[in-house]
Amino acid sequence: MKTKIILVGGFLGAGKTTLLWEAARKLSQAGKRVGLITNDQASELVDTVLLEHTNTSVAEVSGSCFCCNFPGFTDAIAHITGKKAVDVIFAEPVGSCTDLSATILQPLKHKFAEKLNLAPLSVLVDPEQLADILDGRMSGLHMSAVYILRKQLEEADLIVINKTDLLTPEAVAALQKRTAEQWPWAKVYAISTKTGESLEAWLNEVLQSNEAGTHLAEVDYDTYAEGEAVLGWLNTTVILQSKSSNWDIYTENLLNALKRRFEELNTAIGHVKLLIKTGEGFVIGNITGARSFLTIRGSAGESNEARMTLNARAQMEPDTLKTIVLEEISQAGGSNITSDFTALKCLKPGRPNPTYRYDYIVG
């Protein structure tokens, strides 16, 4: 039996992890055996912690992107399929990665055709960013970061406009039409992971179609490298302790404080994600998009100890990002909460150096 590999790319903040969560949940409920692979330039991922709650097999490739560590990616596939037979594996590459068709899909088609069945490359996109790009605006991003976003869309087999719940039906239809005109070789879907609108249609497409990596993008790696390097990356895990705290309120206070700091500096946010887990449950919060859209869901309740994983991607120097995040964590709980950092990594991504890069479409 071949395992279906569904690669879901897209820029930071597009909603990829939420889509994978919902898709994995739906397939698991339908009796499918599902695996998930996350990816980042560093470990301590909110995505991994969250997706472990889907009751599916989860593997993480950290320290480099899938394309720059192709053996690590295939090892993660083998790790999941080695535990038990798996019908479907969803894989979420780093949000600032592009050139996935040439560096991941073509090598997989060439080297693993007997074991793996590849779905079309889906690229998820935030509607506000998409509208800005189509209008020739930067959406608050550096021009090289916009270059990456455009290249992601250029190589997509399926362009998936997310967050349609934020738009009127007329605006969704108009955005779909413009997207199809700009990238006519890609199928265009419009979905909402929040309401579930059209999620089933996209899921049926990636499960049934085997037309993966049908074209390649021409990518200037100097511009690509610059686009990644303009972002500071921070991943941290913190043990929070107090006599008793409401961690949902703490989450809201911390995210609002970070949002305010970034807005004061007029800096673009790729995303800020945090997940706080207690024995009572977990709460997850996100700041995404050009307008710093903030969402919080779930509940961690009240307790005297919690474990927080926080990931931040913002258009600034890593040291500045680190200073802001550490200051706001220390202030969010006042004197009632102590913070013990068990892991803290802050970096600027290096130049992409893919393991393989095919210049032709593998049949």
Image: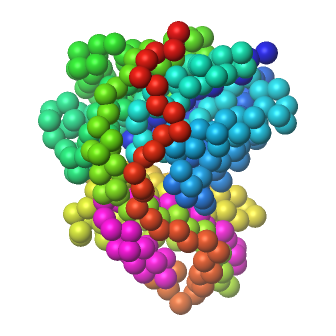
At horizontal 43% and vertical 29% (from top left) the residue drawn is: 123
Residue 183 within the segment the image draws in magenta: no
- As rendered, which of 359 and 47 lies closer to the eye? 359
- The part of the chain drawn in magenta is 302-330
At horizontal 73% and vertical 62% (from top left) the residue drawn is: 280
Find residue 108 and report its image quarter: top right
Tell me residue 245's x, y (percent): 62, 76
Q: Is residue 289 visible?
A: no
At horizontal 41% and vertical 22% (from top left) the residue drawn is: 359
Tell me residue 75's x, y (percent): 71, 39
Find residue 81 and report its image quarter: top right
| Residue 347 to residue 155: above or below | below
| Residue 205 to residue 26: above or below | above
Residue 348 shown left or right of residue 50 in the figure: left
The residue furthest bottom is: 335
- As rendered, which of 37 and 20 lies closer to the eye? 37
| Residue 304 to residue 299: above or below | below
Q: Is residue 152 visible?
A: yes
Residue 329 within the segment the image draws in magenta: yes
Q: What color scheme is it?
A: rainbow
Residue 269 shown left or right of residue 204 in the figure: left
